[in-house]
Amino acid sequence: MDGALRDEALRAIEGIFGDRMKRGPVGEEGTRGEALASVSPVNAHEVELLAKVAGRYSLPIVALGAGTAFDAPGAPGNGILVRFDLMRGVRIRGGEELWVRAEPGALWLELENNLSTHGWGLSVYPTSAPRATVGGWLATDGLGVGSFEYGWLSENVLSADVVLAGGGHRTLRGEELRPFVGPGKTAGDGAGIVVEATLRTRRADADVPFGAAFDEPEDLVGAVASLHEAGVPLWHLAFLDPGMVRARGLGDGYLLFGAYPEERAPVVEGALRETFGSHRGRILPAAESYRVWGRDSSRWRLPGRPRPRRNARSSPWRSSRRRSSPRETVRPTPPSRAPPPGPGRYFCWPSTPKRRAGRDGSE
């Protein structure tokens, strides 16, 4: 693109965003290379207008997350970076079954905290939940907390509003979503940009963490294989290598840990004891399992918000099955929520072939 056309395109984009456009060359944390400009839309309509201008001048568009992924997208040399800091809306609706809709700039931890006011949680979320955004993880797909039961993130997106190359806007479901969730999906390559997504949720007011220590990696691998082959209905399963175990002050060796819904305890507890015993694993006491899971770590507070007190209404230890009445909640104050396991080099698996257990542990 010659200089005159480039300036014409940038003026058109500046007419949409005003001082929310930053002229380049620009690079952002978590990206490689530099782009012509970066913009910060406030709604899906502005993303549509940007896509129309970009299509007219053949400019690629790349959406930015929080830069927590190892394979963050590169900045297009003649394109536009889109930051979603100003699109962080969250909507929660439902009675017996809740669903959550989120804009791409929303933090995963904020979604999880919002849902917990109703005793629900996300089916899966990334291990970098305190910083990672919905749009960022949608752009990379991946496995995270909850993937043992629910698989990849892309399997847990119920629908998504997508701005297409050239400015079209569609709501997609099922197999239609595949071209738009995962690495390398940009509005400049014929795909599009997700501007809102409806995500799968689960009842999460009585999760039970567990853990076991292993001296040898072969024993840990054998335990994982046995749990998978037996179809034990866990929600989450992951492990820490010795380096991360020492860094967190949890001792030495390998740690296998996870969680399951309390109602599955009659099925799960015996299977865990048998599996860990047969593979020379040492079962952690309940208090140590909670510590590994990271339930009381103050570092999981949302930035700029005080850590709330636990009480009868918001405590993660409550046993009440009271359900919320049908209503819509927009960005409620996060409660005292059991936080996700800490960030770092730990690994999680999907249970493949995936076995979606019932609430009582049956299939």
Image: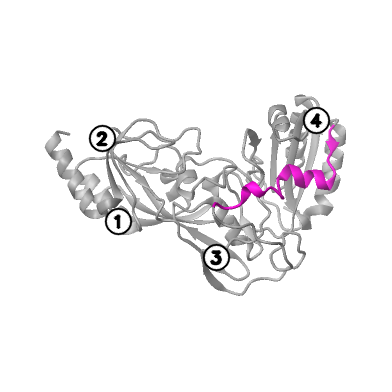
- Estimate the spatial distance between the alpha carbons at disc 3 and disc 4, rounded to whole Å: 41 Å
Q: Is any atom of residue 9 visible in this view?
A: yes
In the rendered image, the vertical position of residue 313 relative to residue 57, given as above or below: below
SS at mark 2 in the image = loop
Of the two numbered discs 2 and 4 on the same chain, state the one appearing first in sequence: 2
**Which residue in the structure is indicated by mark 3?**
332
Q: Position of residue 308 (x, y in %)?
A: 65, 60
1 and 2 marks in contact (CB < 8 Å): no
**Which residue in the structure is indicated by mark 2?**
78
Of badges 1 and 3, the one in the foreground is 3
1 and 3 marks in contact (CB < 8 Å): no
Report the span colored magenta: 281-303
SS at mark 1 in the image = helix
Q: Which residue sits at x=56%, y=47%?
A: 130
Horizontally, is 106 left or right of 49 in the view?
right
1 and 4 marks in contact (CB < 8 Å): no
Of the two numbered discs 3 and 2 on the same chain, state the one appearing first in sequence: 2
3 and 2 marks in contact (CB < 8 Å): no
Label 1 is placed on what type of residue?
Glu
What label does residue 46 carry, if any? 1
**Which residue in the structure is indicated by mark 4?**
214
SS at mark 4 in the image = strand
In the foreground, 23 or 87: 23
Horizontally, is 89 left or right of 321 in the view?
left
SS at mark 3 in the image = loop
- Estimate the spatial distance between the alpha carbons at disc 1 and disc 3, rounded to whole Å: 26 Å
Q: Which residue sits at x=69%, y=27%?
A: 243
In the rendered image, the vertical position of residue 225 relative to residue 110, given as above or below: above
